[in-house]
Amino acid sequence: MSSGFKKFLALWTGELISSIGGGLTSFGLGVYVFQETGSAAGMALVTLLGFLPTLLLSVPAGVLADRYDRRLLLMIGDGCSGLGILYILICMMRGGASLVQICIGVFISAVFSSLLEPSYRATITDILSKEEFSKASGLVSLAGSARYLFSPLIAGFLLGVGDISLLLIIDICTFFVTITVTAIVRKGITTKGSEEKQSFYESLKEGWNAVHGSKGVFLLIMVSSAITMFMGILQILVEPMILSFSDAKTLGIAETLCACGMLLSGLFLGIIGIKRGYVKVLRVSIFMAGMFMIGMSLFENIVSICIFGACFFTMLPLANNAMDYLARTNIPDELQGRAWGFIGFLSQIGYVVAYAVSGLAADGLGTLTGKGVGRGAALMIFISGVLLAVTALTLLRLSAIKELENVGRGGGSR
């Protein structure tokens, strides 16, 4: 094992712990808001305000990742994002937090969290060889899945013996762990500075050119944005769909069982990785994810939801791994930070659309059909699954995307 991969594993461990802590807070706030409001729109609003700052600030955060010490930015982002969670905790301890107070706290946390993604992605490129990218991407997906795999189960049981304040306290404690790990790793990594001083605007322009200059990369990002919209709808609506006929403990168990699929494929990618056929893997995994979304929506049955959900989550690391490789190997090393800032911004616009409309649409469909918000959410998930499968069968077959694999294998611009 190379020294670079050991440093990556240390950073990954911190990310894993942070992901579990963040998942506790996300699950707890979702249940709390739904119980207080009985609306999917309230849950969607909290998620939207927690996500929007990260999206809007991802581009300038990418520029900062190329101009300053990426590890220091990780520490600042992790540490200061805890302030928003602390604010919500204080409100809870004073007798309960209103929807407005929760939105404020989540928004503050998200502003500082926006520093994390470009710096983390660019740091991976700093310390790993090209041959290690696929395995690293699999482990990164696995760490991200921890918020779905471990957090719901833990949170569901903790809510049975305590309240949401306990979850928030645990999440805050995880920030100290991740900051410490990053500080230790930072000592062994040489900071890469720019040889020429550029204006902020010029740095932004270079990042845009890095992703827009390649037709295949830009098209892949646009497809990714559509995919995230459909997946975002599932992310928002699966909780009210289950809570409409069950309780928080069952929801936690169900989300954990579903996320076991991510564990299996994440471990496979972390140990073996994908060797070739990235575009084909991407197309098949996205199509199957759409079909499994349809399956999740058909029955008001927790067993059926868990089976189709586990299959759905099995597809996500495979799709993310393929997308990550195709983009990373077609972007120059020195532009990785700002490029990933733009990639994060453009590819995740779909989430904003999903968070903005899914809750209101589910509430409206539930009222229109007379079957309640739970079945309204299921209908939205069904429609999204159909559109996701259609996207895989059409856009991902375009030649410009297929050519990315040949360029990446040949070294491209790297």
Image (cartoon, rainbow, N blue to C red):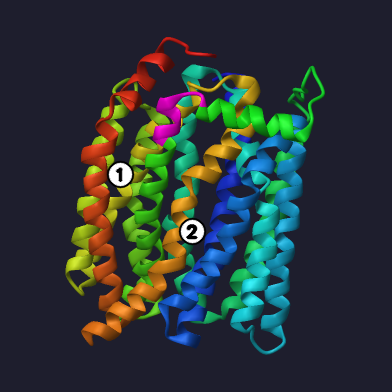
Query: Going by the image, does 334 lie left or right of 44?
Result: right
Q: Residue at the bottom extreme?
A: 95
Q: Earlier in the sequence, mark 1 or mark 2?
A: 1
Residue at point 77%, 25% (across, down): 191
- SS at mark 1? helix
How many numbered callouts? Answer: 2
Residue at point 31%, 74% (across, down): 241
Q: Given the image, on which type of amino acid does mark 1 rest?
A: Met
Q: Given the image, on which type of amino acid does mark 2 rest?
A: Val
Query: Going by the image, does 295 lie left or right of 237?
Result: left
Q: Which residue is mark 2?
A: 352
Q: Residue at the right extreme?
A: 197
Judging depth in this view, the residue of 299 and 46 nearest the camera is 46
Give the prevailing secondary structure in the magenta stretch. Answer: helix
Q: Is residue 243 visible?
A: no
Q: Which residue is mark 1?
A: 315
Q: Residues within 10 Å of mark 2 (few under 14, many from 20)?
A: many
